Image (tube, rainbow, N blue to C red):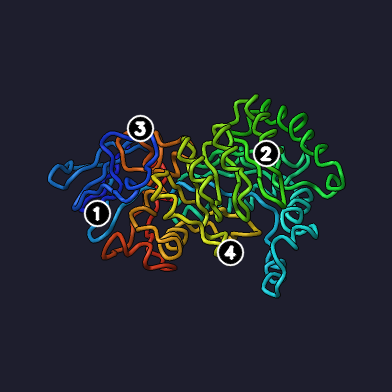
Amino acid sequence: MSTSLLVSNIKNLILTEDSPRNSPLRGADLAHLPSIKNAFLLVENQRIKDFGPMKNCPERADRTIDATGRIVLPAWVDSHTHLVFAKTREDEWVNRIKGMSYEEIANRGGGILNSAKRLQETPEDMLFEQALGRLEEIKNYGTGAIEIKSGYGLTVESELKMLRVIRRLKESNEMGIKATFLGAHSVPMEYRNGNRQGYIDLIINEMLPQIAGEGLADYIDVFCEKVAFSVSETEQIMEAGARYDLKPKIHVNQFYCLGGIAAAVKHGAISVDHLEVVDDSDVEALKNGETIATLLPSAPFFLNDHIPPARKLIDAGLPVALATDFNPGTSPSGRMPFVLSLACIQMKMLPEEAINASTLNGAFALEWADEYGSIARGKAANFILTKEVPSVAYLPYAFGSDWVKRVFIKGKES
Ligand SMILES: [Zn+2]
């Protein structure tokens, strides 16, 4: 049965597209946020049927919402999360408050290995229930599509368990979900003394064939960093992923510039994520490819670390996306509106740039721009209706304020 929903008298309908783009917004284009004042939005069969100025508003629909004084914008596309995990890590956080560094914690078997131990011990059903609760929470912040990574398993059995949990989330939820295999998140302790390659072989020869066989992953990821995997190890794993048609989305340049960005671009990565530190050769590498720079400002905010140089990347004409990096160690928050605020306050992005980067460019970072990320006819009806607000700039400005009033996923209020 077809049901229609009409949102009328919208003060400002944001990020409208008459003909959807086929490539992400780059450089100066990121500041351009098409919108219609005093607008309507019509939803039919879970999709955006029509939109435009009120003078063209249809006369009736099965349901109508009066949005006087309020803004409508596309739901967030959070293209980088670790939302499936077994336990929060506030105890390590307290150790950091007392002066211990992330690297010290990692080298002592804390950090990712701590999460892996907990996850290995936790039954699949419990992981699923916990992750489902987090999904419901972030829906209320306005997130309508998300990427979720494995990487707290670090054994064949537990990586498969994580990815099966993500598959169950996909099947049980209206939200758009893509899965990324991140077996190369950390080298388990038992492989650290002279047998790193043993773990990489396990990823390539045991994990990948089973994951691909069950169709459990859309992408492959590697944590390319001094505390994790080298550039050449990262390349080895990207090459193995390519044999199963898994394109890379790579954790890189969180703490050091090692040349991982150039390697990821060379291997056709959809995105390179983090980029707290970026040198000129990294920018050059990105200029020569299609890879999206995905910035995760809540991680350096939480770690009191380098702020990603968003301006340097945007001013070089590059495509930038924003995501939460929701994870128990370095970003225990899936709140996209806060990411927008950090992007503007700390990284000097304009409100328009931050909104584009959190919606349309996020969708491109998941190769899902035909379905999500803008107000366009035929796309999934995933959108946010704000409270009464004075302007678009008010949204990232009023950090911490709950201006998200109602969230619609596939036309249904969540
Ligand atoms: Zn991450």
Residue at the extreme left of the image, as rendered = 55
Dot placed on the residue nearer the N-terminal end, 1 or 2: 1
Nearer the N terminus, badge 2 or badge 3?
A: 3
Q: Quadrant of residue 348?
A: bottom left
Taking depth in this image into account, of 22 and 136 the one nearest to the observer is 22
Q: Where is residue 404 in the image (x, y as percent from the top left)?
A: 39, 60
Kindly identify which numbered label has been placed on residue 1. 3
- The amino acid marked with disc number 1 is Asn
Residue tagged 4: 305
Spatial separation of the CA atoms under disc 2 and disc 3: 49 Å
> What label does residue 12 carry, if any?
1
Q: Which amino acid type is shown beneath numbered disc 3?
A: Met
The residue under the point 25% across, 36% down is: 18
Q: Earlier in the sequence, mark 1 or mark 3?
A: 3
- Is label 3 in a helix, a strand or a loop? loop
SS state under label 4: loop
Vertical comparison of 33 with 387: above or below:
above
Give x and y (percent) for residue 350: 35, 58
Q: Image quarter for residue 149?
A: top right
